[in-house]
Image: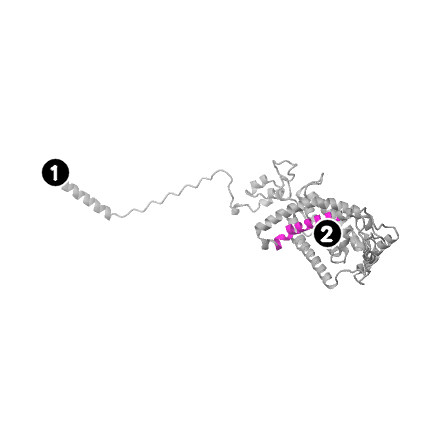
Amino acid sequence: MKKAFLIFAALALCWGSAVAQSAPVAPATPATPAAPAVEMPGIQSQNIMDVKPDASEAPGYAGQTNGERARVQRGNNAPMWRQVNSGVAGFSSLPKTQAPEAGVLIQQFVQYPGSRVTNAGEAWRQVRNNWIIPYGGSLVLIVLVAIGLFHWRIGPMVAHEEHTGRKVERFTPFERAAHWANAVAFVVLAVSGIVMAFGKFFLLPVMGLTLFGWLSYVLKNAHNFAGPLFAVSLVVVIITFMRDNLPAKGDLEWFLKGGGMIEGKEVKSGRFNGGEKVTYWGGVFVLGLIAVLTGLFLNHLLPVFDYSRGNMQIALMVHAVSNVGMMCMFMGHIYMGTLGTKDAYEGMRTGYVDEGWAKAHHELWYDDIKAGRFPAQRSAVAAPAGPAGKPVSV
């Protein structure tokens, strides 16, 4: 009986399996769509396609605050950036005395000579890079080339009077000390300024970044140390030589005849000729004082001034232009005082010039000495000995 039950159960299992294989497969039940993602709290970006095109038609749209704009155009921060671009100051924890513009990200719109109407920082960059650097550098090179061509084609001015061996004092020791102090300071300032302004164009490719960086660092400090010496000695030079550089008889004729270069002969002049007076009033008095004042301002050494970025940018531009003009004038002065006029350097080196030189190049001054209106020996230092070993006199 037990055996018959087992056989029956096995037959039932086989029949059920066959029925399951032959039965049609029921279609799959479609998947239930996923629930939409839940938005996370916080600031969400907005699809540009969802921005209402008529938001700008809202009343007072142009004058909306940043919060009001966010309600009609979420993510539109134009009002905030408009304030930033207009120079509106925000909040800063830095003290006002140390950082007066710490809350101002972008300066107000201005237009400097040679720039577009843009923010002051960009306008200053345009003036410096598009005008001061290329045209200032070109002017310095043009003056150097002109001096070289002049010396090559025309040569130095030579005295037409014979040297007598008798000396007259042209510059006292004090005058020479003031002049040389000012000249040395000027050379340091000029060389360091040229390297800082133009060095990346002609020195950086040759020296490399590291060496050029150290050179610029050293010259920058030399510039700052030579500045006060130049300022003090400039004032001394202005006071010392002002009287003899006032307009006088013979100056107009000197200019009309081009300083004697047209005829190849010096024009009568006083102790200083017309060209030297132009250098004094234009290069020393005007441009020199402008360079000194702007330099002191850039170093925050002038009281009661507002050291804002805008004022500093204007000072930088004026400082650069005045220095380029002063360098060009002084290059001509240096040439005429050395190679351009034979034996002129002797007067600034020793203080004395030959009587024949004085008569040839500054005849009116020589006449004043002969007439006793101007002393031939003004310092307490003894005059150099003449050919016979005796002090000379005029």
Q: Is residue 151 magenta?
A: no
Q: What SS does tag 1 mark?
A: helix
- What type of secondary structure mainly makes up the magenta span? helix
Three-letter amino acid code of the residue under disc 1: Lys
Using the rendered image of the protein, determine whether residue 126 is visible from the camera's viewpoint.
no
Foreground: disc 2 or disc 1: 2
Q: Which residue is mark 2?
A: 326
Question: 50 or 148: nearer the eye?
Answer: 148
Q: Position of residue 120 (x, y in %)?
A: 66, 46
Question: 179 or 114: nearer the eye?
Answer: 179
Which of disc 1 and disc 2 is earlier in sequence? 1
User: Looking at the image, which residue is at 57% across and 50% down?
Assistant: 210
Q: Is residue 156 above or below residue 3?
A: below
Q: Position of residue 102 (x, y in %)?
A: 62, 39
Q: Which residue is mark 1?
A: 2
Q: Which mark is residue 317?
A: none
Q: Residues within 10 Å of mark 2 (few under 14, many from 20)?
A: many
Question: 39 or 322: nearer the eye?
Answer: 322
Going by the image, does 269 lie left or right of 307?
Answer: right
Q: What SS does tag 2 mark?
A: helix
- Residue range (magenta): 179-202
Q: Residue furthest left?
A: 1
Q: For residue 103, what is the image quadrant?
A: top right
Q: Position of residue 129 (x, y in %)?
A: 64, 52
Which quadrant: the N terminus?
Answer: top left
Three-letter amino acid code of the residue under disc 2: Met
User: Looking at the image, which residue is at 68% across and 55% down?
Assistant: 135
Q: Residue furthest right?
A: 371
